[in-house]
Image: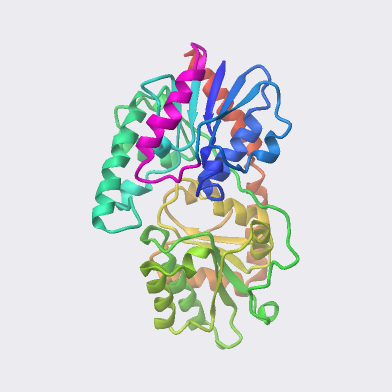
């Protein structure tokens, strides 16, 4: 068997996002099968896989496909001028293509293709572009032109039962037996002595809740996090001594309309002195930011898998999440589920973990136990076996 893998999301703007982290970790572990030849498609640019590939096994070849390209409206052009010509050069009658990111291009008309579908968030929320309505409309057409090729894919990998059912809503004729649910994992990279450099000096006395890695888009429900925190403060006797809400991530401090409106919303709620916007944080700061918090908040209205939940459980903090999409499936009783649109429920959950230490410790214990079932090695092993089985069917 010969597996061709698209690894370009380990190089472009997604290299530190969920898709890039997924690709890196699957490739890192899947190439450990010496009986299979692997061809890794990479731009002529650095990759998060470089350290792993310095001493790559003999069954692994790197296929450079040209200049680094950002994933954008011209993806179709890059696919036909960079990806596809190289795929055709190296493919044999034993080749199968694994596509971790469909926007880069699905070669299902050229060779057997296994596609990874991370979520169906764009059509569900009609958010295809960060730009205006015209850009959203153009990106929507491009989205369906490409994803429609999935109907010809040999099989499909999804990251949750929720994603599987969502995919089948849009493609009800696709054989559900050819869709495999394979859970992901989280990546917490080391520690950093300066992990708390952007926190208030009195955070140890007051404590904090943390919301990290999100965006200001409607589906992420970042305002819902602020609303729940405001409700918590109403329940406490002293706001001055109340814990902070730390919102970590570069998206919240950007100079764009959505981010500015979000910051104005915090001021409108009178919380500018209690909500801390850290901006960008290093990967090796995440674990400590989480483990030192009272609880992690993630009230996104839709996720395909929710890597952030696994990060919180592995870091040893209580997880409070929206009771919807994949969250109940991923947590499986190891966190606190609330209606992300109900600030009363959010505030009550935050208040309880703050006041009831035994309850909080029980949630943390459940999370740590639940987190043990997630591993990138397992993800890669199941993916490899599924690809192998798909080819022989």
**Residue closest to the far top:** 93
Q: Position of residue 369 (x, y in %)?
A: 67, 49
Is residue 224 depicted above or below 206 in this figure?
Answer: above
Is residue 359 depicted above or below 53 in this figure?
Answer: below
* Residue 332 in view here: no
Residue at point 26%, 47% (across, down): 138
Q: Position of residue 287 (x, y in %)?
A: 67, 59
Tell me if 296 is positioned left or right of 257 in this view.
right
Residue 270, image quadrant: bottom left
Tell me if 263 is positioned left or right of 250 in this view.
left
Residue at point 52%, 68% (across, down): 349
* Residue 248 in view here: yes
Tell me if 297 is positioned left or right of 376 in this view.
left
Is residue 10 depicted above or below 88 in this figure?
Answer: below
Asked whether residue 86 is drawn in magenta, I would say yes
Q: Position of residue 172 (x, y in %)?
A: 30, 31
Residue at point 44%, 58% (across, down): 300
Give the residues drawn in magenta, as a range. Answer: 68-95
Which one is nearer the viewer's eye here, 63 or 250?
A: 63
Which one is nearer the viewer's eye here, 363 or 75?
A: 75
Which of the image's four quarters has the N terminus?
Answer: top right
Colour theme:
rainbow
**Residue closest to the far right:** 193
What is the tally of numbered marks visible in this picture?
0
Which one is nearer the viewer's eye here, 239 or 103?
A: 103
Which one is nearer the viewer's eye here, 87 or 170?
A: 87
Residue at point 42%, 43% (across, down): 119
Q: Position of residue 68 (x, y in %)?
A: 50, 42
Asked whether residue 89 is drawn in magenta, I would say yes
Is residue 283 depicted above or below 248 in this figure?
Answer: above
């Amino acid at each position: 068997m010969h597996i061709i893998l698209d690894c370009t999301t380990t190089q472009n703007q997604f290299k530190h996002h969920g898709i890039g982290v997924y690709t890196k970790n699957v490739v890192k572990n899947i190439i450990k099968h010496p009986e299979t030849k692997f061809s890794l498609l990479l731009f002529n640019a650095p990759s998060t896989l470089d350290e792993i590939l310095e001493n790559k096994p003999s069954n692994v070849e790197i296929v450079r496909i040209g200049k680094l390209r950002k994933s954008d409206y011209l993806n179709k052009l890059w696919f036909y001028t960079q990806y596809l010509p190289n795929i055709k050069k190296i493919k044999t009658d034993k080749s199968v293509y694994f596509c971790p990111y469909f926007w880069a291009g699905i070669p299902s008309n050229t060779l057997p293709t296994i596609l990874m579908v991370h979520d169906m968030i764009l059509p569900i929320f009609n958010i295809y572009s960060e730009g205006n309505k015209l850009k959203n409309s153009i990106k929507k057409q491009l989205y369906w032109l490409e994803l429609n090729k999935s109907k010809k894919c040999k099989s499909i990998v999804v990251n949750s039962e929720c994603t599987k059912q969502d995919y089948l809503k849009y493609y009800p004729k696709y054989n559900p037996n050819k869709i495999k649910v394979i859970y992901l994992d989280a990546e917490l990279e080391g520690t950093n002595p300066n992990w708390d450099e952007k926190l208030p000096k009195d955070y140890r006395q007051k404590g904090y809740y943390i919301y990290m890695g999100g965006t200001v888009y409607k589906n992420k429900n970042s305002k819902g996090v602020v609303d729940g925190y405001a409700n918590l403060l109403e329940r406490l006797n002293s706001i001055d001594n109340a814990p902070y809400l730390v919102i970590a991530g570069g998206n919240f401090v950007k100079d764009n309309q959505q981010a500015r409106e979000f910051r104005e919303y915090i001021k409108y709620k009178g919380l500018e002195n209690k909500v801390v916007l850290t901006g960008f944080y290093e990967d090796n700061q995440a674990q400590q930011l989480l483990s030192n918090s009272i609880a992690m908040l993630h009230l996104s209205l839709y996720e395909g898998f929710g890597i952030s939940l696994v990060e919180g459980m592995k870091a040893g903090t209580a997880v409070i999440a929206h009771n919807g999409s994949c969250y109940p499936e991923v947590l499986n009783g190891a966190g606190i589920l609330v209606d992300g649109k109900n600030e009363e429920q959010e505030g009550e959950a935050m208040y309880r973990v703050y006041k009831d230490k035994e309850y909080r410790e029980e949630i943390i214990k459940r999370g740590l136990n639940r987190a043990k079932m997630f591993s990138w090695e397992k993800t890669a092993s199941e993916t490899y076996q599924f690809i192998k089985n798909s080819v022989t069917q």
